[in-house]
Amino acid sequence: MSEPEGDEARIFAACRAAGLEPTGLTWLAADLSLRRFARVTTANQRTPTLIARVEAPEDPAGRPDGVAPEPPLEPIRALLERHGLPVPRRCGGDARAGIDLLEDVGGLPLRDAVHTLPDAVRRTLHREACAWVPRIQRVGAVPGVAAFERRLGPALFAYKGDLFARHALAARGREASASETEVVREAFARIAAEMEEAPRRLAHRDYQSANLFVAPDAPEGARLRMIDLQGALLAPPEYDLVCLLRDSYVELSEEEIAAHLAFVREALPDAPDADAFAHRFDLLTLTRKGKDVARFLYAARERGDGRFLAHVPATVRMLRRAAQRSARRDAAFARLAELMDEMPESPCGP
């Protein structure tokens, strides 16, 4: 094996410092994040493979002004591990180089498992994922853990609204007008105000099928492992459930979503009222899916990365349904619902 350079050399050095002799490295396919991940093989029988997670300089455009960048993976990973949550074990790392060496949780995210497992098994996995949400929300604040100092607040909602107005509405083949942009901003500000009245609990923040890995042969109730934990923050109790059940990569039926929500609602620490729970679920769908479809379209238009365009149709359908229900409950969302209806499922324009 030739002597590695750059990030590979730093990963190998971190492995050796942890007592794990590396024998090979393969970079994994990148997602929308700027971080890099590699699968490392080692000569250690107990840890034959591990995942190297390499931080990258952040893109300041990925967050609003005044909101701090995401903190490191530690200590939130260690805190969740102490609470018995299914997170990867830490094998070592180099904090100065921004490298974490983590347990290899396999190569089957729930996003891909839907294509390989019987639907009954897949439903059970979604039920298992729902059951972890109350466990996450019961983790209490600990000094020095940045997640408890971060919150889903007005600045982040406004940022999501601006992304949606700028990038998603352009899928109609024209840029949003000033009045249309104002409709979006007012609607997202109204959502932010409503969420200020909601309880705040710890949330993974990106609790979707791409970040839940499946071990099909593990016992029922222990088949999932969650990754990408560093973005954890305080959010309304419905937020992680929106990420999971309104997932652009796995479009669930309305009947299945309703069944999962009924199962998990009373288990949440705050046991929200059913009507408030349903309303906040739809409002958070608008902000989460609005941001997601904007990022998919931005990646295609500005980066030339069209891999995520296949997920635009499902995302638009989720937005339309949530907007229609929200407008029926509150007429203030009627114009936003009209804009959602104008969005094509197959994007056009530049």
Image (spheres, helix red, strand yellow):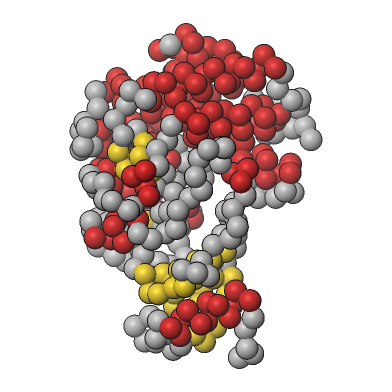
In percent of width and height, residue 322 lies at 47, 24
Figure quadrant of residue 117:
bottom left
Residue at 21%, 31% (x, y): give it. 271
Image quarter in which the C terminus is found:
top right
Drawn side of residue 137 relative to residue 318, left or right: left
Q: Nearer the viewer, residue 117 or 218?
A: 218
Q: Nearer the viewer, residue 250 or 205?
A: 205
330 relative to 45, above or below = above
Residue at 47%, 14% (x, y): give it. 327
In percent of width and height, residue 190 lies at 46, 18
Image quarter in which the N terminus is found:
bottom right
**Residue that sits furthest to the right in the current view:** 350
Q: Is residue 344 visible?
A: no
**Residue that sits furthest to the bottom in the current view:** 1
In percent of width and height, residue 104 lies at 42, 70
Q: Nearer the viewer, residue 188 or 334?
A: 188
15 relative to 269, above or below = below
Drawn side of residue 31 relative to residue 202, left or right: right
228 relative to 12, above or below = above
